[in-house]
Image: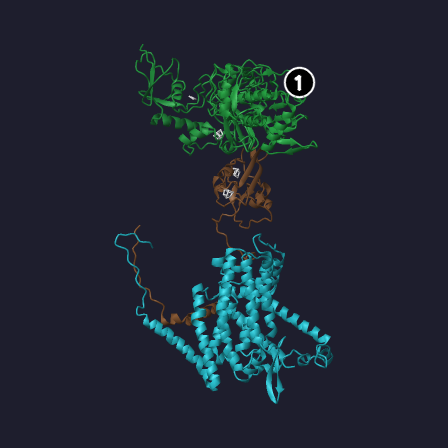
Chain colours: A cyan, B brown, C green
Amino acid sequence: MMGVLGTAQLGMAPIVAHIFSKNDDGSASFGWVIGRILVVLLMVHVILILGALMVWAERRVSAWMQDRIGPNRVGPQGLLQPLADLGKFMFKEDVIPGHVNKVMYTIAPLIATIPALITFAVVPFTGSYETVGGESVAVSWQIADLNIGVLYILAIAGIGVYGIALGGWASNSKYSLLGGVRASAQMISYELSLGLAVVPVVLMAGSLNLGEIIAYQAENTWLIFTQPLAFFIFLTASYAETNRLPFDMPESETELVAGYHTEFSSMKFALFFLAEYANMTVAAALVTTLYLGGWTFFGLETLGWGMGVLIFSLKVIFFLFAFIWVRWTIPRFRYDQLMNLGWVVFLPLTLINVVLTAGAIALDQTWMFFLLPVLLIAAACVATWIGWKRDEDKFQPLPTAPAAGEEGHA
Amino acid sequence: MTVTVKPVRRRKASFLDRLYLPAIAKGLSITFMRMFKPKVTMQFPEERWTVRDEYRGMPVLVSDDEGRPKCVACSLCEFVCPPKAIFIVPDELEAGNNVERGPAVFDLNMLRCIYCGLCEEACPEEAIFMSKNYLVWGAEREDMIFHKDKLYELGGVREEGVKKWKDK
Amino acid sequence: MADVKTVFINGVEYPFDAGQTVIQVAHENGLDVPHYCYHPGLSIAGNCRICMVEVEGDAKPQVSCKLECAPPPWVSEPLRIQTESELAKSARAGTMEMLLVNHPLDCPICDQAGECHLQDYSYQLGQGQASSSTAKTKLPKNVAFGEKIVYDAERCIKCTLCVRFCEEVTETNELNLGGRGDEEIVIMSSKGEFETDYSMNIIDICPVGALTSRDFRFKSRLWFMDFADSVCTGCARGCNVITGGRNGSMMRMEPRHNADVNQWWMCDQGRLDYRYVNTPTRIATPRIKTADGVWAAATVDDAILAAAAALKAAGGNVLVDGGCTLEEMHLAQQLAAALGGKATYAAATGEADGFLRVAEQGANAAGAELLGLARATKAGAAAVLVVERDANVPQALRDGADAVVVFATDADHVPASAQVVFPFGSSAERDGLFVNTDGRVQVAQRNPGIGPDNLTPPYELLEEILGELDAGYDWHGRDGIVAAIQAQPAFAKISLPAAQATAEVGATS
Ligand code: SF4
Ligand code: SF4
Ligand code: SF4
Ligand code: SF4
Ligand code: FES
């Protein structure tokens, strides 16, 4: 029963518990299935509502950062603005341009959205301590307890980019196509570092199960302390994966109008929109789970499963805020810079990190876990410093002065 | 014009610049601090700008101090209007009016008007003025064509200015 | 007494005829000397003093309209006149100031604005600032001079042109000056109505906006209107006119000087005759009657094909309006020949008034006769009918023709038998040649501001229909048509102006 959202753990009244529990022989009862469906629906709505709130938050926060107020008319503090937006999207004309591939064009938004929703199934959002074999173990609750949770998430999230690439291709427009191609190239480049940044985590926790990763962190320490480099690279790569600034090449409106969703309107466009925010939520939840101990917070989580939800939510919200914060601070990278960062900087760093972590585990030298990141960061700094030192001339070459009397341009 | 070019020695990116992260941290702190600074947004329908005297808003027709429409349908504004926003059909007025002549139709197409103020400039009767009204809206094209009565209503009474026909 | 035959104006020597005044010689030679009370068609009054010029050797300027070119008998040298010297200019400026002392600033409501001599000279000579501070006199405004004319005494400069016109041209003496000094105004005889049908000419000759037309009153500003030189088709005199229109509507008609036809004048009936042009039932696009008897708008091309088909089936005569141009009549003849019939024209007969108006109402009846068209006096069958005016082709003729293809201006003039209808331009909307009652060929020009948009000229339509009839007709264009007419024996002694010629050209037979 470990990790399963069982009614007993929810501490509900016995009668309710009975209705939603499994049959005595452990097979699925009708009530159990119903309960499961209810929980799934609940989670889907939580993500959707979170996505909507993110739109609001994005607009408010960006406004604050720019000395503005932001939407504050619809509902208290403009909180109902997303509803109004939704109404607008629903009643807008759903234009399907004549030159598109209708089938692909129609399903592309769905392909982009659904993976974002279903990845959430394995994310543990709270838990409790149980005594297993005389030891107190942190047991996480999630919708589906998968042994290969990490792989599942990486695999499913990878499908999302199909939606974007397909949408771009099916639109049969140059801007959209460029956006779609960029999205897939970006995805391929960063999926590598993203995956390699997770490897040390898996190595250290010894499991691909997210619940067990949390349990490891609860027992030892949060992995952000032992693997700061992996954390940083994972965070950055997830920005690229979710197509957020500073890596929003696929939509970069200054070059591509709106990139892959240029030709989409009405709810189709809204779905792409939603997918982006749902992906952000998943990414934030994943960072929280992998590096920040998920629903645990130095013993505070023992107060009850509700506290676990709160802790988890606050951590996720912080990272969501970080998404917005970064978007309104750092300008977009050039495409070559993006690729450089992915292949030349992140990939080697993560590889070295993996090798060193594996070595430390093999030698069972846990102290190395703390030293490694320091070493790595120091090495990176030294490498940069050497490069800078070798560049003898600290100044750019002077522009050739125009000959006397010649007319120059200011 | 000759421009004197003064070469400036520009530094290359320094070591810290090359690390990028300090700059990013600085940027993040700036945007974060900005969130708590006072806001400059004006809450539009409730709060309004103080419109300056020389502001050129929508052109309107005015009446004299006795409430009589001033326009005599001379059509000079129609002639001078660069985008041809004005359409006038002159007509003979009955005795007892301001003058013997006035517009039967005076249409101002605010979809065309460019707020140049030439109509005000051209009007020999000081009958058309650029008002301070910058809220010109309509739900349909038709709504944006303002007719004579509406223009006089918007313009109201203007006491100063020429009153040529007063003693006629 | 020396025989002086020349006069120097601004240093250039010009010859003159006996009795000519300086202003006449100046105008003949293209010099611009301002004038109000002078009119070449009327006696010289010399009362407005705007035409002042300097006579070298004289301390005082003189009025050029009354100053004869012949010097006094005791002088043997030609006069030396300066029209633009300081003295002349300051004299005129002084006159302007006096004229404006009591003149109202009416221009915004004055119909004359834009063609007002007072405005023009005020721009040239005026000071923009009055030195008199006394209140302006108040005089009657909006006085009816008969039904057609409105008089404004404040604007009047008492040049007496109107009075002289009624005295000398119409000899009916309806107008005179009354009152004195500031209060002097033009008054009308106690009858209160003009006896002459030429009264509206005083509107044209009035140099200011004192006399305006009741009909044109406040209708449009001149600067919005399009003007074209044309001829009046009210009767066979063919007075030369200028048509004025705006946005498709005809606004007014004014006489144009032609010493051989109408001098400076035209009759009121002809002037006000234009109103049929603006009828609400004007036909703007071709129409075809569908199988179930309903009219449907058609493109020009479709209508031409339909007309040709209908005509092939019907065959027969062609009946044209006597107000058609030579070109149209010629093509009507060709069409009739192709259909195996004859072309005739119809025109009304009115009353001559002994001055300009003649009894013949068909503006081009003389042309029709030259081309050899017979005059239709009673109803007869005709497959094609061209109606410009109800008067020329009355209902009886229209209905009696049993026509299938009809060219008409007014939907009310289309007989029930019609199957294809083409819009026909009024006389202001068609280019063409007219032969007046004296056998004089005159050019009418289309006014682009009048009539429905994109009206296809009737001669083009007729040519296209002819082409569709497979009668071996080649498309000529207007020049070709004119050349074909010119080639006819009846026109051997007449030289037709080229199609593109301006209305100024008008060769006599
Ligand atoms: S402001 Fe300018 S554009 Fe507008 S009506 Fe007046 S003249 Fe026309
Ligand atoms: S210029 Fe003035 S008086 Fe003349 S029509 Fe326009 S508003 Fe009326
Ligand atoms: S007569 Fe001439 S100057 Fe006088 S008001 Fe009329 S247009 Fe103006
Ligand atoms: S009404 Fe006109 S033509 Fe007659 S006297 Fe006056 S200004 Fe002259
Ligand atoms: S024109 Fe010569 S005095 Fe009037």
**Which one is in front, C219 or C275?**
C275
**Which one is in front, C114 or C179?**
C114
Q: In the picture provided, is C290 more to the left or to the right than A321?
A: right
**Which one is in front, B161 or C52?**
C52
Residue reaching furthest to the bottom:
A134
Quadrant into which the N terminus of chain A falls = bottom right
Q: Please tell me how many numbered marks the rendered image carries.
A: 1
Residue reaching furthest to the top:
C1
Give coordinates of residue B45: x percent, y percent: 56, 56
Chain of the residue on which disc 1 is drawn:
C
Q: In the picture provided, is A97 more to the left or to the right than C294?
A: left
Q: Is residue C369 above or below residue B53?
A: above
The answer to whether residue C437 is visible is: yes
Q: Is residue A299 above or below residue C446?
A: below
**Which one is in front, C106 or C313?**
C313
Give coordinates of residue A239: x percent, y percent: 50, 69
Give coordinates of residue C190: x percent, y percent: 58, 18
Residue reaching furthest to the left:
A404
Q: Is residue C364 above or below residue B97?
A: above
Q: In the picture provided, is A255 more to the left or to the right than C347?
A: left
Q: Amino acid at mark 1?
A: Ala
Q: Which residue is mark 1?
A: C379
The answer to whether residue A73 is visible is: no
Quadrant into which the C terminus of chain A falls = bottom left
Label 1, ligand 4: CB separation under 8 Å: no
Where residue A146 sits, quadrant-wise, is: bottom right
Residues packed near mark 1 inside 10 Å, few (<14), some (14 to 19) or many (20 plus)? some
Q: Secondary structure at mark 1?
A: loop
Give coordinates of residue A397: x percent, y percent: 31, 63
